[in-house]
Amino acid sequence: MELKLIKIGNSKGVRLPKVILEELGNFSVADLKVKNGSLVITPKYATRQDWESKFKDFGQDKEEPELLMDFNNDADEKEWTW
């Protein structure tokens, strides 16, 4: 895909087409590198981005999963000296 450089003050920039942005997903910061004579732009995603939407329906269609740990036991009292 060919892009034209646009003047932004004393710098130049590129506009990323909507189709590219849709493929990459939601990001607002990117890393820019020069590698072997090419520009490489890599999106940086926020930590825990989209967790809310991914876990919104978690467990809704299934039975309640068993707890990974049984917190209602006396193992701490038996196995540890306090």
Image: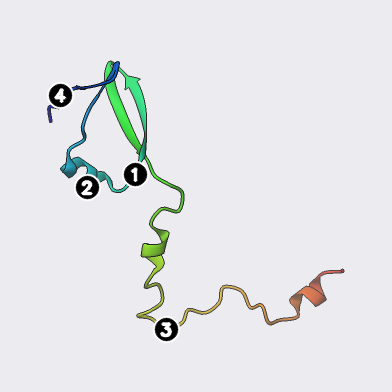
Q: Residue at x 46, y 82 (%)?
A: 64
Name the amino acid, label 4: Lys
Tag 2: residue type? Answer: Glu
Occupied quadrant, residue 68: bottom right
Q: Which residue is mark 4?
A: 4
Of labels 4 and 1, earlier in sequence is 4
Q: Is residue 56 above or below residue 42?
A: below
Q: Badge 1 is on which residue?
A: 27
- Mark 1: few, some, or many residues within 10 Å (few <14, many ≥20)? few
Give the Cα distance between marks 2 and 4. Answer: 20 Å
| Mark closest to the chain's N terminus, 3 or 2 | 2
Considering only vertical position in the picture, is 44 above or below 25?
above
Q: CA distance from mark 4 to mark 1?
A: 22 Å
Percent position of residue 60, x then y = 38, 79
For the residue labelled by badge 2, is the local secondary structure a helix, a strand or a loop? helix
The Cα–Cα distance between marks 3 and 1, rounded to whole angstroms, is: 35 Å
Residue at 12% in and 27% down: 2
Give left or right: position of 52 versus 7. Answer: right
According to the picture, the residue beneath numbered tag 3 turns out to be 63
**Which residue, given by chain and number where applicable, does mark 2 sit on?**
22
Where residue 55 appears, x then y in whole percent? 40, 67
Label 3–label 1 contact, CB within 8 A = no
Q: Are marks 3 and 4 in contact (CB under 8 Å)?
A: no
Residue at 33 percent of width and 20 percent of height? 34
What residue type is disc 1 on? Answer: Phe
Q: Marks 2/1: CA distance?
A: 10 Å
Name the amino acid, label 3: Glu
Q: Residues within 10 Å of mark 3 (few under 14, many from 20)?
A: few
The residue positioned 15% from the left and 27% from the top of the image is 3
Circle 4 crowding by C-alpha within 10 Å: few under 14, some 14–19, many from 20: few
Does residue 4 appear left or right of residue 24 in this picture? left
